[in-house]
Amino acid sequence: LQFISNRSINHLISGNQEMLEDFHVKSDFNELKENMSILESRLKGLVISGYIRDTEYLRPELQNINHTLELLDKNRFNSNVHPYLKELKELIAEKILFNRQVLDTLRFRGKPAAELMINSHKGAQLAAAINNDIIRISELHRAKLTTLIESADNSGRKAKAIGTLMAIT
C-alpha cells in the first residue's frame, strides 16, 4: 500500500510540475503577442512620422521577440505542437523581414512608398497568421492541461484513498 501511495503522490507532484510549465508557456505566448504588437506599433509610428534615425531603431523589440522565442524553445511540447511552432517561427521571421523592408523603403524611397507597403495589408495578414498559430498552439496546450489536471485529480484521489485505508488498518 505504501508503494502505491508513494507512486500516486509522485504522479500528482509530477502532474503539478507539468501544469506549471504549461502556465509558463501561456505567459510566453502572451508576451510574444504583446512584443509583436509593440513592434507593429513602433513601425507604423516611424512610417507616420516619416523619420528614421538609424537601421537599428527596432532592435529592442526584435531582441524581446527573439528572447521570447528562446524561452518557448526551452519548453517541452507534444509532438502535435511542433509543426505549428515551426510555422509560427517562420511567420515571425517573415514578418520581421517585411518590417525591415518597410524601414528600408522609408529610408531610401520615402514615406509615401512605405505607406503603400503598410497599406498592402501583407503585414496585417502575417500578424493574423501569427496570432492564429498562437491560438492553435494554446488550444493544444489547454487540452494537455485539462488531461494533466484530470490525471492529477485521479492520483490525488488514489493517494487519499490509500492513506485512508492505511489509517484504518
Image: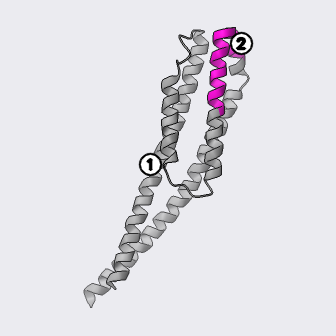
Which quadrant would the C terminus be assigned to in this image?
bottom left
Which percent across, then down, holds residue 26? 49, 47
**Which residue is tagged 1?**
24
Picture coordinates of residue 64 (x, y %)?
48, 32
Q: Are marks 1 and 2 in contact (CB under 8 Å)?
A: no
Q: Quadrant of residue 166?
A: bottom left
Which of 34 and 90 lies nearest the eye of the viewer?
Answer: 90
Give the vertical position of 47 relative to 9 (above or below). Answer: above
- Distance from the alpha carbon under mark 1 to that under mark 2: 41 Å
Kind of element beneath mark 2: helix
Q: As displayed, is residue 30 above or below residue 121?
A: below
* Residue that appears at 31% across and 86% down: 165
Q: Is residue 7 shown above or below 126? A: below
Give the residue pinned by disc 2: 113
Dominant SS type (magenta): helix
The quarter of the displayed image where residue 16 is located: bottom left
| Comes first in the chain, label 1 or label 2 | 1
The location of residue 159, given as percent across then percent down, is 36, 77
Note whether 110 is above or below 6 in the view shown: above
Q: Is residue 107 magenta?
A: yes
- Point out the stretch of residues depicted in magenta: 94-116
Give the SS element for disc 1.
Answer: helix
Amino acid carrying mark 2 in the image: Ala
Q: In the figure, is residue 85 to the left or right of 17?
A: right
Q: Residue at x 41, y 55 (%)?
A: 20
